[in-house]
Image: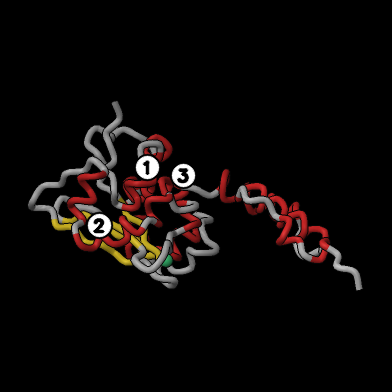
Amino acid sequence: MPHDHSDHPHALLPSDPALRVKALETILTRKGLIDPAALDEIVDTYQNKIGPQNGAQVVARAWSDPKFRASLLADATAAVRDLGYFGRQGEHMVVVENTPDLHNMVVCTLCSCYPWPLLGIPPAWYKSDAYRARVVREPRKVLADFGVTLSEKTAVRVWDSTAEVRYLVIPMRPAGTEGLDVDALAALVTRDSMIGTALVQAPT
Ligand code: FE
């Protein structure tokens, strides 16, 4: 039987990762193993529909509505599900709240577990060996690298995510935001503030 290279597509894959992904997608589509429309839908969902703006809505509501805040702290999974935020990598959510006495930070020391339905795809630094190793050993130094200096009186607690439990930080609501509605508040809430590596700044 003649050696047919079409049976060995791996040998023909280009070295550039983007081209390699495209080539793999083409092969899998031709073999009927994936539906390209479904793939486009998944990519679009995580690029455009799911991202930190979801978590920011949750934080802004917690700041605005004491009953929602209480339900969030009691059972975050149920509270965010009621807002329509659920799905893969968000099945068991825990929300922790920053106060003047306590600053919370989130890491996954094993890999890169992250609350996808609320924050989207994790940033590269969250997955880096440096962040994962250092944040548990020297959280204040890591905060300083992010430009955050806390009062010495503020304790720092680092939460290690697992395949089971994902964390979201409610940052402290900045002064001068008393008159803002939920959407205006949400616009102030950054991704990093919900991981615990940033503070929310007052509007300028
Ligand atoms: Fe992980």
Residue for badge 2? 104
Image x and y of residue 118, in percent: 46, 54
Note whether 144 is above or below 29 in the view shown. above
Residue for badge 3? 53
Q: CA distance from mark 3 to mark 2?
A: 20 Å
Residue for badge 1? 190
Quadrant that contains the N terminus:
bottom right
- Neighbor class of circle 3 (other Cα within 10 Å; few <14, some 14-19, many 20+) is some
Image x and y of residue 29, in percent: 79, 58
Image x and y of residue 108, in percent: 36, 64
Of marks 3 and 1, which one's residue comes earlier in the chain? 3
Quarter location, residue 185: top left
Note whether 73 is above or below 119 in the view shown. below
Amino acid type, mark 3: Gln
Note whether 202 is above or below 122 in the view shown. above
Q: Is residue 45 visible?
A: yes
Note whether 104 is above or below 171 in the view shown. below
Of marks 3 and 2, which one's residue comes earlier in the chain? 3
Quarter location, residue 146: top left
Q: CA distance from mark 3 to mark 1?
A: 8 Å
- Neighbor class of circle 1 (other Cα within 10 Å; few <14, some 14-19, many 20+) is many
